[in-house]
Amino acid sequence: MKLQPIITSLLETDLYKFSMGQAIYHQFPSYMTTWTFKCRNKDVFFTPEMVEEIKEQLKAYCTLRFTEDELNYLRSIYYLSSDYVDYLKMFQLDREHIKTGVDEDGQLTIVAEGPWREVIGFEIPCLAIVQELYMQDKEVDLEYADSVITDKIIKFKQANMKYPFKLSDFGLRRRYSSTWHEHVVTRFAKECPEFFVGTSNVKLEQKLGIKPIGTFAH
């Protein structure tokens, strides 16, 4: 069965990974670091088949490069410097920098180790891959879920009239799936323009033409 990649673009990460990545590129270009995945739920286990698919998904992810359209989009973000985007033009993650397995307690282990300016690219997509693969075996009524979104939009609109607020999406690492994430963000962008201000998912920002939202390096 042919692998269907979960992450299909290097833009499919949170915006702050670029603001932070730029700071690392300029200030700590040779700094080495280790990033370790930790599942906080002790009752969550991954089958050997799921672990193998995570490995294959990461292998596919490490083949990705930025396209010219994606680089041009990053250039349009005013605080990203031209030299940093030029660096990203040559950027590609090294599969040797991330190891996946299962520990003696049956818990999933993922460790990324290498230059900080590169390893930083693993975190958000890796979390999205693990989450989506874990949820594939769960029965989810998406029609009902969509009705919940409808109800929330109605309530948010009513609340916003009385107490104006702004809403943004930071759900990439926690999403049910990439298609569902896009569906939810698209609904809020179209139906709630008065208070929905954008998403941290850079690929969705580019695709939907909505505002990029995220923190700066800290």
Image: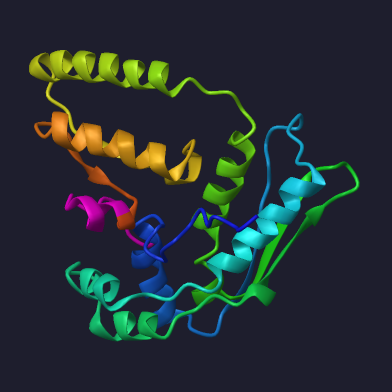
At 22% from the left and 13% from the top, the residue drawn is 155
Q: Is residue 209 magenta?
A: yes
State left or right for residue 30 relative to residue 153: right
Residue that lies at the very extreme toward the right in this rendered image: 104
Q: Is residue 27 above or below residue 59?
A: below
Q: Residue 210, image x and y in percent? A: 18, 49
Residue 185 appears anywhere in the view: yes
Q: Residue 50, image x and y in percent? A: 72, 47
Q: Is residue 34 above or below residue 162?
A: below
Q: Main secondary structure of the magenta part?
A: loop
Q: Residue 168, image x and y in percent? A: 26, 38
Q: Quadrant of residue 166?
A: top left
* Viewport quadrant of the N terminus: bottom right
Residue 192 appears anywhere in the view: no
Q: Quadrant of residue 116?
A: bottom right
Q: Residue 150, image x and y in percent? A: 26, 18
At 52% from the left and 23% from the top, the residue drawn is 140
Q: Is residue 149 magenta?
A: no
Nearest the eye: 24 or 7: 7
Residue bounds of the magenta highlight: 204-217
Q: Quadrant of residue 207?
A: bottom left
State left or right for residue 99 relative to residue 218: right
Q: Is residue 183 above or below residue 48?
A: above
* Viewport quadrant of the C terminus: bottom left
State left or right for residue 78 relative to residue 9: left
Residue that lies at the very extreme toward the front in this rendered image: 1
At 75% from the left and 41% from the top, the residue drawn is 46
